[in-house]
């Protein structure tokens, strides 16, 4: 199982994106995001609760595997933290493209 990225590794990701982007280029990131007012434990409880009660196309075993993945591999940041990391790397602005519960698509501009 791949390891989740630390906040420092996310910073490195944005730094490398900025290094390789042309001026006026952009990077689109789709990932899980924390609500500004939530802690990770609240996120885990809500997301895993939704998996348990709403993902009925999966077997109980498959839902358990998804829940384990979420608990062990999801370390989301808030959009504000992601914007700060992007700004630290020299990306000048960002905008949300779409939000689907915990998953968000953002565009960060060089």
Image (cartoon, grey):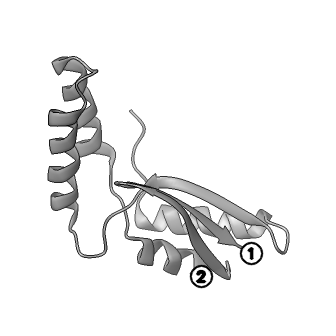
* Of residues 103 and 72, the one drawn nearer to the viewer in this rendering: 103
Q: Position of residue 60 (x, y in %)?
A: 16, 20
Residue at point 57% right, 65% down?
12
Residue at point 27% right, 32% down?
66
Q: Secondary structure at mark 2?
A: helix
Relative to residue 59, is residue 25 drawn left or right? right
Measure how far apart labels 2 and 1 are at the Cα level.
Answer: 10 Å
The quarter of the picture where the C terminus appears is bottom right
The quarter of the picture where the N terminus appears is top left
Which of the 4 image quadrants contains residue 54? top left
Dot 1: within a 10 Å radius of its alpha carbon, few (fewer than 14), some, or many (20 or more) residues? many
From this view, report whether residue 73 is shown above or below residue 96: above
From this view, report whether residue 51 is shown above or below residue 5: above
Q: Position of residue 62 (x, y in %)?
A: 25, 21
Q: For residue 87, which numbered disc appears in the image?
A: 2
* Residue at the farthest right position: 22
Residue at point 26% right, 20% down?
58
Q: Position of residue 92 (x, y in %)?
A: 68, 82
Relative to residue 48, is residue 7 drawn left or right? right
Residue at point 82% right, 74% down?
24
Q: Which residue is mark 1?
A: 110
Dot 2: within a 10 Å radius of its alpha carbon, few (fewer than 14), some, or many (20 or more) residues? many
Relative to residue 26, is residue 11 drawn left or right? left
Count of numbered badges drawn on the protein: 2
Asked if the residue under mark 1 is in contact with the one under mark 2, i.e. CB atoms within 8 Å, the reply is no
From this view, report whether residue 8 is shown above or below residue 88: above
From this view, report whether residue 12 is shown above or below residue 43: below
Q: Position of residue 90 (x, y in %)?
A: 68, 81
Q: Of label 2 and label 1, which has the lower sequence position? A: 2
Q: Secondary structure at mark 1?
A: loop
């Amino acid at each position: 199982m791949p390891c989740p990225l630390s906040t420092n590794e996310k910073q490195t990701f944005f730094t490398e994106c900025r290094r390789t982007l042309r001026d006026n280029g952009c990077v689109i990131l789709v990932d899980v995001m924390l609500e500004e007012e939530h802690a990770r434990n609240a996120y885990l409880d809500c997301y895993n609760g939704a998996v348990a009660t709403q993902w009925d196309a999966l077997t109980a075993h498959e839902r358990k595997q998804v829940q384990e993945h979420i608990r062990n591999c999801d370390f989301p940041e808030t959009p504000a933290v992601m914007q700060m990391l992007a700004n630290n790397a020299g990306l000048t602005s960002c905008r949300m493209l779409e939000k689907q519960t915990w998953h968000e698509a953002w565009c960060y501009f060089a």
